[in-house]
Image (cartoon, rainbow, N blue to C red):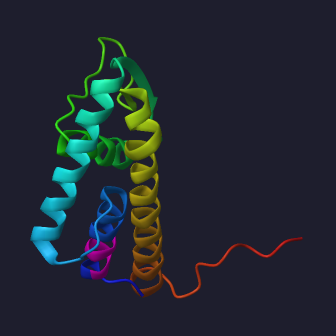
Amino acid sequence: MTTEQELKEKLRKIEALFAGASTHGERQAAMAARDRIKEKLKAFEAREQPVEMKFTLGDGWHVRLFLALCRRYGLKPYRRHGQRRTTVMLTVVPSFVDDLLWPEYEQLADALREYLDEATARIIREEVFKDAEDPEPR
């Protein structure tokens, strides 16, 4: 069973992986990793022109995660009038998205999904009814 603290550590390790970090000290390593990714973004921007990109995400917590990740790196996500709440627009260098932002988002989302699935199953099992398995096939 994953605890919230274990999840937070896993999220920090994912960020450090994408930043190319070699150490995993708590706050200092996370801040250094964030700075390294911002430097990579600047390098991408020196080689390529930013373009407007559209991201369609599954639900509210995926949107919140993506928005937080974008803002962490100094990007300014937005939504056009009339777009759905699950749509996020971003003016960014495509190679930064392809090489860093989107793969990191996917790994963070997978870690959170795993944690949320586990927590949901545990709460249902403990508070609603012990047997919440799939129905038997007939």
Q: Main secondary structure of the magenta part?
A: helix
Q: Is residue 138 magenta?
A: no
Q: Nearer the viewer, residue 102 or 24?
A: 24
Residue 96, given in percent of the width and then of the height, sits at 38, 36
**Is residue 21 at all visible to an observer of this figure?**
yes
Residue that appears at 47% across and 38% down:
98
The residue shown at (30%, 57%) is 19
Residue 92 lies, with reference to residue 127, above or below; the image says: above
Q: What residue is rendered at 15% in x and 76% in y?
A: 26
Residue 68 in view: no
Write down the region rendered in magenta: 6-10
- Depth order, front residue of 24/121: 24
Q: Which quadrant of the view contains residue 78?
A: top left
State whether residue 21 is above or below residue 3: above
User: Outermost residue toward the left?
Assistant: 28
Residue 56, image x and y in percent?
A: 46, 31
**Relative to the observer, which residue lies in front, 32 or 57?**
32
Q: What residue do we see at 44% from left, 59% from top?
A: 107
